[in-house]
Amino acid sequence: MTTSQKTAEKSGERIAKVMARAGLCSRRDAERWIADGRVSVNGRVLETPAHTVTADDAIKVDGHPLPAKEPTRLWLYHKPRGLVTSARDEKGRDTVFQKLPAELPRLVSVGRLDINTEGLLLLTNDGGLARTLELPATGWTRRYKVRAFGRMPGDALEQLAKGMTVEGVRYGPVQATVDRGESGGGPQNLWMTLALQEGKNREIKVLLNALGLEVSRLIRLSYGPFQLGDLPSGTVKEVKSHVLREQLGKSLIEQSAAFFPKRNHASGTAEKPNGAPRPPRKKPKHAHRRRSP
């Protein structure tokens, strides 16, 4: 257990956050469950999610003890075009989470991809990790392959590298190379590779449109140290626990309060706390995350 986790458990955390970290539901769902009178702490039914609990409190959902905290896990998913990266869609379109294997636990996405953007999407069972990895301050680069058409100014790559302001919104530096086609000259089809760290809503399309280019295909190739590689479209692959720990490093594990159980060196297995049976689910399994380019 990390220093930040020990501190949080001693000082207390919001009940909705604790429920989410146990892998039971999202924070939003936890707040709804509390409003519905389904959650009790030390025998008292909660009426508001504005309640702090510690490791010493007895939390029950629908009369069942809260399950033990699940180890932090991460999956690589090759998102196809045409899927919405959200738990629910008001227009009734297919979502990423509807297409995932049924045996996976409740997952949240690290950022989001537009419906017509394809490529690497990170999925995790740990909302704290997802929020940490989305932050520009984390410093993880997102790399994209882009197909676009139009007349691109000769200094377009320099403009991107310096950062641009479009309709009053400031976008940070983007490292770009032209893989096929040339900057300058008449309208043409271009293939480009772009690398950025911010991930504002529709950032790549907004920037290239401001440079006179219309994006016709956008593929995320990597997110930080994790690569799309040859992962087939529509498939998901879990990152091994020891690889995830190594790639996150001590700092990000501390910041996100990611949970990696200590290993029993005698048996080679992870030591898991004794968990109680999981209460039955009555709400949607997946959470809503912020949009990335």
Image (cartoon, helix red, strand yellow):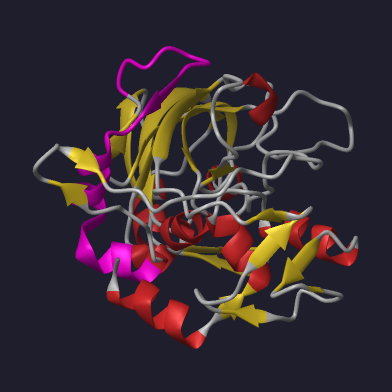
What is the residue that sits farthest to the bottom in this orientation?
A: 11
Position of residue 6 relative to residue 82, above or below, is below
Horizontal placement of 85 versus 176: left or right? right
Looking at the image, which residue is at 47% across and 27% down?
77
Q: Quadrant of residue 79?
A: top right
Is 182 part of what is drawn in magenta? no
- In this view, the residue in front, 281 or 210, is 281
Report the number of discs.
0
User: Percent from the top left, x then y, of residue 200?
Assistant: 56, 56
User: Percent from the top left, x then y, of residue 224?
Assistant: 31, 47
Is 252 part of what is drawn in magenta? yes
User: Percent from the top left, x then y, of residue 190?
Assistant: 44, 25
Horizontal placement of 200 versus 274: left or right? right
- In this view, the residue in front, 61 or 216, is 61
Position of residue 227 relative to residue 124, above or below, is above
Extent of the magenta region: 229-255
User: Percent from the top left, x then y, of residue 240?
Assistant: 27, 34
Looking at the image, which residue is at 27% across and 44% down?
244
- In this view, the residue in front, 243 or 122, is 243
Position of residue 292 relative to residue 145, above or below, is below
